[in-house]
Image (spheres, rainbow, N blue to C red):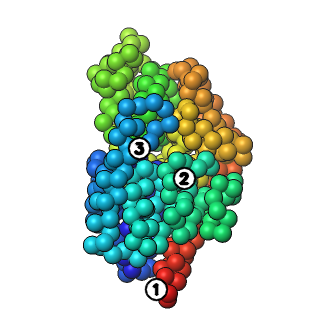
């Protein structure tokens, strides 16, 4: 069995593919190839999981004016021919995508070669990339039944969203050792996403003098996003370190020990992330479905700060409608609001329990197995033709 995984740009389109990869490797002898973009992000994730990697060119079609939109069609065409060469040489039995523009030329090339294709729709709202791939898909799997209306009925199925099993094996004591955490303080995990979230990172940095009074923080700021020196945050207060930030209080008693409560990282690998997930009392995150799915399986109370003007707002509203998460609107986000939200949730045991139970019930827990079953059926049916 030879399987091509394709996607990238952010961790959101890669995480479900890695979950499927891990599940298949447990029970089957299979070869995998990851076809992604020319940037480092998906290559590093593939290599971390020992999956051979091949890059292709791709163009992102932005839904607003941008000069790069004029080049996008040419990049997609170039990516199509690059993918065509890779697929003809490698001869996969099936191609799997979970969205992203990087996958579009690969899926088109797979269809041209008459290869079976599975496209997974994670988010509530159908993205443009999946719209472009839908006509060529053999099977479309969706996370939520609300998304079925956007796809052809005969080839679509509700499965839930695959979650990497490796993330479910974290240990609190190991986390305390890795991140040098204190036993007596609650832990807040803040996720800026694989590529970072500048607005969220800025609020976190400015909130440190207040928020470190009552908790300790593991902050994953994103690749290349040092929140203290990042040039994109030049309009914010930019100290050289958390110690300098705390110096604003001009109090030795205040500063003593507080800097040790803040643990900033640009990125965590899977072995580190699973322990951070496990030890977190609450999580602050964007509204990418991969991350929300992982937190749902782990039953974590969540505060969502969706990226404005994107599909994330729809995801966040869905979780909030099920009382499975709290939402903070970025347009009104400030240090006082952020600090109060975190403090109140940490203090409310009943609300944490309610959010934990509700987010757990929102997600199908055997999504990975269901999708792997569909993949096997498609390959078997294709071989019998």
Asked if residue 60 can be seen in this view, the reply is: yes
The first of marks 2 and 1 along the sequence is: 2
Q: Camera-side residue: 163 or 13?
A: 13
Name the residue carrying label 3.
60
Query: x, y percentage for residue 150?
Result: 65, 54
Residue at left 37%, top 31%?
Answer: 67
As displayed, is residue 81 above or below residue 194? below
Distance between mark 2 and mark 1 Cα atoms: 28 Å
Distance between mark 1 and mark 3 Cα atoms: 34 Å
Q: Quick one: quadrant of the N terminus? A: bottom left
As displayed, is residue 379 above or below residue 202? below
Q: Camera-side residue: 339 or 327?
A: 327
The first of marks 1 and 3 along the sequence is: 3
Residue at left 31%, top 53%?
Answer: 78
Splitting the image into 4 quarters, where does residue 3 fall?
A: bottom left
Do tag 2 and tag 1 residues touch (Cβ < 8 Å)? no
Name the residue carrying label 2.
131
Residue at left 63%, top 58%?
Answer: 151
Total label count? Answer: 3
Query: x, y percentage for residue 381?
Result: 52, 83
Q: Camera-side residue: 357 or 225?
A: 225
Q: Secondary structure at mark 3?
A: loop
Asked if residue 201 can be seen in this view, the reply is: no
How packed is label 3: few (under 14 Cα within 10 Å), some, or many (20 or more)?
A: some
How packed is label 2: few (under 14 Cα within 10 Å), some, or many (20 or more)?
A: some
Q: Is residue 208 left or right of residue 55?
A: right
Q: Is residue 241 left or right of residue 377?
A: left
Splitting the image into 4 quarters, where does residue 302 fall?
A: top right
Query: x, y percentage for residue 261?
Result: 41, 32
Q: Which mark is residue 320?
A: none
Q: Which mark is residue 383?
A: 1
How packed is label 1: few (under 14 Cα within 10 Å), some, or many (20 or more)?
A: few
């Amino acid at each position: 069995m030879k399987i091509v995984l394709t996607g990238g740009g952010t961790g959101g389109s890669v995480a479900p593919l890695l979950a499927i990869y891990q599940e298949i490797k447990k029970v089957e002898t299979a070869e995998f190839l990851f076809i992604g973009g020319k940037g480092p992000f998906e290559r590093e994730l593939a290599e971390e999981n020992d999956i051979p990697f091949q890059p292709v060119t791709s163009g992102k079609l932005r839904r607003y004016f941008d000069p790069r939109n004029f080049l996008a069609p040419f990049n997609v065409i170039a990516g199509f021919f690059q993918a065509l060469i890779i697929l003809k040489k490698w001869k996969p039995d099936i191609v799997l995508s979970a969205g992203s523009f990087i996958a579009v030329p690969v899926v088109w090339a797979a269809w041209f070669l008459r290869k079976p294709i599975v496209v997974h729709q994670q988010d509530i709202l159908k993205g443009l990339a999946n719209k472009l791939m839908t006509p060529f898909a053999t099977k479309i799997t969706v996370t939520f039944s609300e998304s079925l209306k956007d796809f052809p009925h005969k080839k679509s199925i509700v499965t839930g969203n695959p979650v990497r099993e490796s993330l479910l094996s974290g240990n609190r004591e190991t986390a305390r050792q890795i991140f040098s955490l204190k036993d007596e303080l609650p832990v807040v995990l803040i996720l800026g996403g694989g590529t970072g979230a500048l607005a969220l990172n800025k609020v976190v940095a400015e909130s440190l003098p207040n928020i470190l009074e009552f908790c300790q923080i593991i902050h994953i700021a994103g690749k290349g996003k040092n929140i203290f020196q990042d040039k994109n945050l030049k309009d914010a207060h930019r100290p050289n370190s958390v110690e300098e930030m705390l110096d604003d209080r001009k109090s030795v008693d205040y500063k003593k020990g507080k800097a040790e409560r803040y643990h900033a990282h640009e990125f965590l690998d899977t072995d580190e992330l699973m322990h951070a997930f496990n030890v977190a009392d609450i999580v602050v995150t964007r509204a990418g479905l991969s991350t929300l799915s992982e937190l749902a399986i782990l039953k974590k109370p969540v505060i969502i700060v969706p990226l404005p003007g994107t599909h994330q707002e729809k995801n966040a509203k869905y979780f909030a409608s099920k009382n499975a998460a709290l939402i903070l609107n970025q347009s009104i986000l400030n240090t006082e609001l952020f600090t109060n939200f975190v403090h109140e949730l940490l203090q409310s045991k009943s609300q944490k329990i309610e959010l934990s139970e509700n987010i757990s019930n929102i997600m199908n827990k055997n999504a990975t197995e269901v999708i792997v079953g569909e993949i096997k059926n498609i390959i078997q049916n294709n071989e019998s033709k």
